[in-house]
Amino acid sequence: KNEVEQSPQNLTAQEGEFITINCSYSVGISALHWLQQHPGGGIVSLFMLSSGKKKHGRLIATINIQEKHSSLHITASHPRDSAVYICAVRSGGGSNYKLTFGKGTLLTVNP
Amino acid sequence: NAGVTQTPKFQVLKTGQSMTLQCAQDMNHEYMSWYRQDPGMGLRLIHYSVGAGITDQGEVPNGYNVSRSTTEDFPLRLLSAAPSQTSVYFCASSPGPLAGGLRRYEQYFGPGTRLTVT
């Protein structure tokens, strides 16, 4: 079973700061997902990646397959970025659609 | 597209009652799954389906049943509710092998059902 560890568990930042959330996993994967969940809200997929780097607006996700590590960066953070960020990995390929989730990182951005 | 829909949004049950959580998607996705989310635990897979007529157990299946008679619907049944089943339940879907490359694994979540068992 793949173990997924996120750090930090909680993160408080001031508006405008650069944010980094880390995710490590124990077994080789076919894809890694970054998800966002606002308090009391649903879950939205931000990125799915298997190598390299992806960027969407102020969000950047990177993955290092050899080191089994991924990072989610938020540039110029804003209070609306306050949410729980969840890393999830899909092990194997083909018809394996099952995800293993980290416990999430609670980000609070203060104005 | 409405995406993934779930009903009800909130539900309170007494111990021993049964109920069905509804999940539907209108994207013709082959893969559907049910998760529960508990504080400090992360999301855990209850049951999943890789297509109509095919279901399988996930990490925490006890006390739950599922069926997949159509591509669109994937209901989750609580047979005899227990306080340990108090949780937030999320349904999700993925396109499956008909989509190309990694797109088959894209994950779409429903809005969740908050269930309290007293």
Image (spheres, helix red, strand yellow):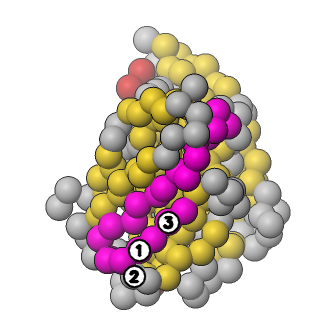
SS type, badge 2 = loop
Check the picture and name the quadrant holding the N terminus of chain B: bottom left
Q: Where is mark 1, residue-wise?
A: B68
Q: Residue at x 48, y 33 (%)?
A: B13
Q: Is residue A5 left or right of residue A96?
A: right
A59, above or below A108, in the image: below
Q: Which residues are magenta?
A: B65-85
Neighbor class of circle 1 (other Cα within 10 Å; few <14, some 14-19, many 20+) is some
Q: Is residue B76 magenta?
A: yes
Mark 2 vs 1, N-terminal side: 2
Q: Position of residue B23 (x, y in %)?
A: 35, 57
> Closer to the camera, A67 or B33?
B33
Q: Residue at x 26, y 58 (%)?
A: B3
Q: CA distance from mark 3 to mark 2?
A: 12 Å
Q: Position of residue B105 (x, y in %)?
A: 48, 73
- Evaluate whether residue A77 shows in this view: no
Check the picture and name the quadrant holding the C terminus of chain B: top right
Neighbor class of circle 2 (other Cα within 10 Å; few <14, some 14-19, many 20+) is some
> Closer to the camera, A79 or A75?
A79
Q: CA distance from mark 1 to mark 3?
A: 7 Å
Q: Residue at x 75, y 73 (%)?
A: A28
Q: CA distance from mark 2 to mark 1?
A: 5 Å
Q: Is residue B73 left or right of residue A79?
A: left
Residues at discs 2 and 1 in contact (Cβ within 8 Å): yes
Q: Position of residue A69 (x, y in %)?
A: 73, 58
- Evaluate whether residue B116 shows in this view: yes
Give the numbered dot on residue B66: 3
SS type, badge 3 = strand
Q: Position of residue B43 (x, y in %)?
A: 61, 48
